[in-house]
Image (cartoon, rainbow, N blue to C red):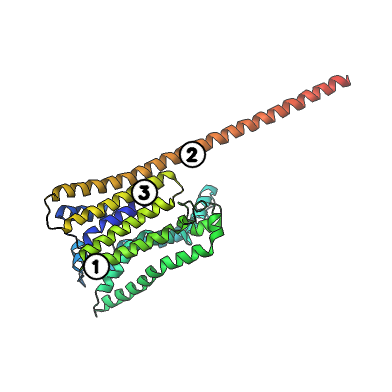
Amino acid sequence: MWSLINTVQILALIPISKNKLTPVLVGFFSSLNEVVPIPNPFEPLQEKTPNTHRKSSDYGFESSLFLTNAGNSLSVMIVILMLWPVVSGLSKCKVKFIQKKFTKLLSEYKYGVFIRFWVQSYLEICLAVLIQLWNFSTEPLAIANWVLGVVFGVFLLVSPVLVLRFIAKKPEQITRLTEESAFYGMFGSLFYEFDVKGGKFARYFYVFFVLRRLLYCLNLMLMGAFPVMQSLINIFLALGSLGYLVAVKPYSESILQVTNTVSELGCFAVFGLVNYFLGEDLNYEKQVEEVIIYTTLAVMGVQVLASVLIFFQTIAELVKRRRARKKAVVEELQIEETKDNSKALEFFRGRKMGA
């Protein structure tokens, strides 16, 4: 499901580019942001300072305030922080089953949950930071948001560097990653999906992941005066991501590897097709519009299919493990029964000889 969200996040922002998309395509891509509706507690602030970046404002980011534009992600963060003491309390529950589950979850809370949050929110926060830095106002509220934008912007810039350095310093822990290890509880969310033992570059997936999103947001916000170059950069970023998936094959699950590669190929096709609207001769506007929509829906469908296949695969593995455990128990009982029978037979033989 993470792959679906990641794909939707990228495609949903296409209308911010300087491409002359049809109203249907603008509405279609914009609606993708509403696939997972999340309340924004900072929305009442949006009328205070307008966003002067026209394309992002037309898209829906009417406010320049960082808190408003990053509100959905920040509200998720608030919920995560509020749940922390609940998880901590349940980890001390006297019911062993509950205690075991929440103790494991608490170990992931230290770093794992926040790393996953940062990875998934990177694109939205990055765009919110750039919109805030684009707009400067002397209003106290705007200045406070501008400072917040700068702080988060620094985190955005250092994130890929920190992940890169971390991976370089911890090669053995990453290679020997197991679910039982403390390292997995803290940092497993960066590596558990990938073939870190078989592929050297698979462990760097999220370095490329955040770099693509950083460059994508910078391109959308800063290259509007050069629409052709902007479109070519978007195509290049999609091609680079596709090339990484094909060359490195980072995913440990073959289902995820195939479906993510197919989805990235679809994204590359979409970025290539929207380039059509930069031209003057738009005789096939309707046909291209339909192809883009159906390609996007196909990409999303592939990601949903992957989730369904992984679900059934997990169920099949659980059933297989349960059957294996039952078989082991039966074999153990048979061995014990054989031993008991042997002992009984020896006992009666001993008595017979004694008589």
**Lower sequence index among marks 3 and 2:** 3
Disc 3 vs disc 2: which is toward the camera? Answer: 3
Q: Quadrant of residue 44?
A: bottom left
In the picture shown, does residue 81 fall above or below 326?
Answer: below
Q: Is residue 237 above or below residue 336?
A: below
> Which numbered disc covers residue 261?
3
Residue wearing tag 2: 317
Q: Secondary structure at mark 3?
A: helix
- Decide which of tag 1 and tag 2 comes sooner along the chain: 1
Q: Please say whether residue 38 is visible from this viewpoint.
A: no
Question: What residue type is disc 1 on?
Answer: Met
Left or right, 351 with respect to 249, comes to right
Quarter of the image holding residue 240?
Answer: bottom left
Question: Which amino acid lies under the numbered mark 2 shown in the image of this protein?
Answer: Glu
Which residue does the numbered mark 1 point to in the structure image? 223
Q: Are marks 3 and 1 in contact (CB under 8 Å)?
A: no
Confirm whether residue 126 shows in the render.
yes
* Within-10-Å neighbours for mark 3: few <14, some 14–19, many 20+: some
Counting from the top left corner in percent of width and height, residue 74 is at 34, 64
